[in-house]
Image (cartoon, helix red, strand yellow):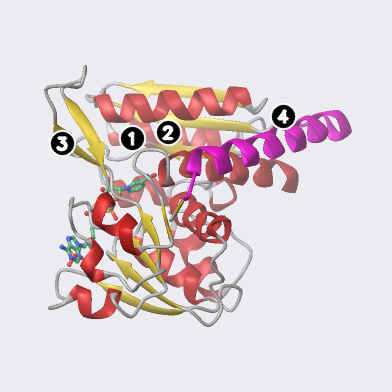
Amino acid sequence: MKLIDGKKLAADLRREIAEKTAKLKAARGITPGLAVILVGDNPASVSYVTAKEKACAEAGMLSREIRMPATATEEELLGAIAALNADDAIHGILVQLPLPKGFDEKKVINSIAPEKDVDGFTPVNVGRMLIGEPCFLPCTPHGILKLIEFSGMETAGRHAVVIGRSNIVGKPVAALLSRKEANATVTVCHTGTPDVGAFTRQADIVVVAAGRPGTLTGDMLKPGAVVIDVGVNRIPDATRPKGFRLVGDADFDSCAKVASAITPVPGGVGPMTITMLLWNTLESASRT
Ligand code: NAP
């Protein structure tokens, strides 16, 4: 069984991104700039934003953090986005989700200029992805495709089962895997699927993004399948300094006995998400 090392793949790609960033600066005097807007002080969001800014700086990019209190108005947030849309030093804009209660997330995301939507969440980007036009691919799904490629598993002609149909993971992963470039046959399972195992047992590739530990177990896999575990779940654990540990949606031990390759949690999909954000920011800056 092969462990699909997301940290290593992410490190390799970040080195490549840093080299291309340096070349862009030298050749055209352009420094890719990413603006990250954080509203409120949700601890998980603060740590995600900090990690994104650190990665940005390490790649030689400009990172601009805009912090607003949870009491900020939607007009203030929309105003900040409008200013960034018009700012030539900024090539990517990211609004850290979830927003505090009272904000209309759809309206806020829709206000990001599609050419700076490096998260790939605006309806314009999602539409372009679906009809195969140039766009920013959403970061987690794009990272998942890279991890499948890294595992050595061909997607063309294979059966991929995606567990979960959220707008940020399940649906775009299913869409990307069924594009001509990947050419997989895709089944999407969700809570309305009576027997998820009946589908996963036929799958060469299983992507599990349910947000529930133990959603996928070894007895639900075909021998040799590749498993991409997107889930990030906190399990109380008194032996850990923070009082919890992170687990994925797959039961790692039983799945590892049957799968040919599996991503660990942490250290699988997580590091790839930020990497693909840097990738999109560089691409955006290169287009200017
Ligand atoms: P979400 O919006 O809660 O969606 C979960 C999906 O899984 C839903 O479509 C749900 O079905 C389905 N589902 C839940 N339990 C299921 C079960 N037992 N069997 C079959 N389907 C089931 O979650 P999300 O935003 O996609 O995130 C999924 C997980 O990935 C979370 O743990 C999240 O933290 C993690 N995540 C990680 C990264 C990363 O970078 N590592 C990025 C994004 C998300 P219904 O539609 O029927 O409710």
Between the residue at mark 4 and the residue at mark 2, the CA separation in whole angstroms equals 24 Å
Foreground tag (4 vs 1): 4
Q: Pointers 2 and 1 in contact (CB under 8 A)?
A: yes
Front of the two marks 4 and 2: 4
Q: Residue at x 46, y 63 (%)?
A: 126
Q: As drawn, is 157 to the left or to the right of 246?
A: right
- Of helix, strand and loop, which one carries label 4? loop
Residue at which label 3 appears: 235
Marks 3/4: CA distance?
40 Å
Is 95 magenta? The answer is no
Residue 38, compared with residue 260, is above or below; it is above
Q: Where in the figure is residue 286, as x and y percent of width and height?
A: 74, 44
Tell me residue 96's x, y (percent): 37, 36
Measured in 3D between alpha carbons, the distance from the residue under mark 2 to the one under mark 3, in whole angstroms, is: 39 Å
* Residue nearest the observer in this picture, 12 or 36: 12
Q: Position of residue 55 (x, y in %)?
A: 54, 28
Judge from the rendering whether residue 102 lies leftward or rightward of residue 69; answer left or right: left
**Residue tagged by mark 2?**
79
Residue bearing mark 4: 31
Residue range corresponding to the magenta coloring: 3-30
Give whichever of discs 2 and 3 has the lower sequence position: 2
Q: Would you place residue 87 above or below residue 153 in this image?
A: above
- The prevailing secondary structure element of the residues shown in magenta is helix
Sequence-wise, the earlier of marks 3 and 4 is: 4
Within 8 Å of ligand 1, the CB of disc 4? Answer: no
Q: Secondary structure at mark 2?
A: helix
